[in-house]
Amino acid sequence: MKEKKNTESPNQKSVICGFSDLISVEGLSEKIFDLIENVSFLIFYRSIADHRIAYTNAYFSRIFNLPVEELRNKDYRWTDFIAPSDKERYFRFFEELKTPKYVLEYRLIDGSGQPLWVQEKGTVLSSENPKEAMVLGFINEISERKKIEERLIGSEEQLNLALMASQMGLWDWDIPNKRYTGNGFWTRMLGFKPGTFATDEFFWMSIIHPDDLDRTLRAIEDHLSGKTDQFFMEYRVRTNSGDWKWVWDQGKIISFDESGLPKRMVGTIVDITALKEAQAELLSAKAAAEKASRQKTELLASVNHDLKTPLTVILGAAETLLLESENASKPMLEMIRSNAKRLQKMVGNLLEISQIESGRLILTPSTVRTKRFFDDCESNYTQLAKEKNLSFEQRIAQNVPKTLIFDLDRFLKVLNNLVENAVKYTLEGSVRLEIQYAPEEIGPSQRRNRGGHLQVAVSDTGIGIPSEYLPAIFDRFFRVPSKRSRSIVSGSGLGLAICRELVEQMGGAISVRSVENEGTTFEFSIYVKEGNGAL
Ligand code: ADP
């Protein structure tokens, strides 16, 4: 009968064998047969025991690029066309199949050698001898759907990886159904095994710390009622073991129902317990630091009063006595005077530093007649240098204006410190002071308020500073650790630190150049305003 049909109708070409077992081809109208042959999916009829193909429609040629007659000449089984990676699964599926109807998805290898995802839907036709049972089924291409699914799985995996990497939990709240679900990380964060976490909103509310519950619910309410664009809140949650964890929770409504009521809200949650602990430590450290700072200010205020005043009295008395004293007591008085002076300088420095630190340093600029000021400098410093048999040279640039406005006391503090150091750390040779003026560039209309930088260089031919110590030279309490400089004279290591602070407050900068055993140059500048020349 089969042979007869093949010759009778070109539409029945793909009938290979056995199809007549299923339907009486004679009874099948040509139209129906034509339809079966031309549908855009594959129809097959094959043995279930060895997967031998009895019939496929013409769609076979479209997938495998093979004429259906091929099947007739060769002894093909359906499994010959299945991708190797899916073959085992395919065999196992049929070995274990218990129901007559089934659906299975797997890959074929198409005519161009590429894997092709298909869905097979079949019905096992009962037979007296199970070995002879046949399957009639359809095969649909599902590559597009699979691609979308894979992409979805890919992006979900990506999301999960990103959430895992950022240690972030994800929650999803089905508002009308009161269902609240957390992802794996969220549940693990709370010490629950995934899947053991209750999924109703009451459970979530029940683990919020009682002290945080009200404001958290209020924030949620504000978002649900549209008062806020987003919900975010820091609160504590009770873990499975009963401990409390701080979390940072933020979420947003993502869908509304037909009547505009919130339907679904999603959000992320992060464990911020470590952050909160660090914050608490920081706050207590800050409180302790503030307390220490207050105590320091109080201490310095009392130092100012209780130390500075008697020191001034001792110094005054020592100086008066020195003038009147006999030779025998002179060295003792000299010692009292120099030690009191050192103490006075140190107390002064400490007070200066504390003023700078507390932000209480306020500059008090005044108009300075420059010629008189520099003449005074010259005579004082020449005297100072002479005490150590050093020469002193001073050069003031011609363009320094007659009057300048700046904080004279603070400027002198820096200058005195540098010149005194230059004298202190120079055993022979000279100390030199050079002052230049660099007016700022301005238009003619601004001439009245013109300003500029007073640039000062103090150089000496002293012991110098080893290059490795130069970077630390302006640090507080830093002194070059050399026997030589320490043997010269004692000091506190505060002078240069104060110089830098004052210079910066006065709108300038300070720097140092030095060559060991040759000498040192300190340069600094301060911002000044030009006076009108008259006082
Ligand atoms: P002090 O002189 O009270 O120790 P300073 O802050 O004024 O403190 O100076 C810090 C250190 O810098 C000094 O101990 C000294 O070693 C070094 N120093 C400062 N000026 C000079 C200088 N002109 N020549 C060599 N060393 C210097």
Image (cartoon, rainbow, N blue to C red):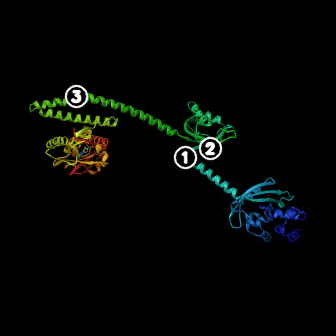
Whether the residue under disc 1 has CB within 8 Å of ligand 1: no
* Residue 58, image x, y percentages: 79, 66
Left or right: where 74 falls relative to 495? right
Q: Which residue is mark 1?
A: 166
Q: Give how far apart the Cα atoms at labels 1 and 3 are.
A: 64 Å
Closer-to-camera residue (504/422): 504
Q: Which residue is mark 3?
A: 310
| Mark 3 residue type | Pro
Q: Which residue is mark 2?
A: 183
| Mark 1 residue type | Ser
| Mark 1 secondary-structure assignment | loop
Of marks 2 and 1, which one's residue comes earlier in the chain? 1
Left or right: where 42 falls relative to 311? right
Q: Give how far apart the Cα atoms at labels 2 and 3 are.
A: 73 Å
Of marks 1 and 3, which one's residue comes earlier in the chain? 1
Badge 2: few (under 14), some or many (20 or more) residues near its Cα, within 10 Å? some
* Residue 23, image x, y percentages: 87, 62
Closer-to-camera residue (523/527): 527
- Residue 61 shows up from this direction: yes
Whether the residue under disc 2 has CB within 8 Å of ligand 1: no
Badge 1: few (under 14), some or many (20 or more) residues near its Cα, within 10 Å? few
Badge 3: few (under 14), some or many (20 or more) residues near its Cα, within 10 Å? few
* Residue 145, image x, y percentages: 70, 56
Q: Decide: is 511 above or below 78.
A: above
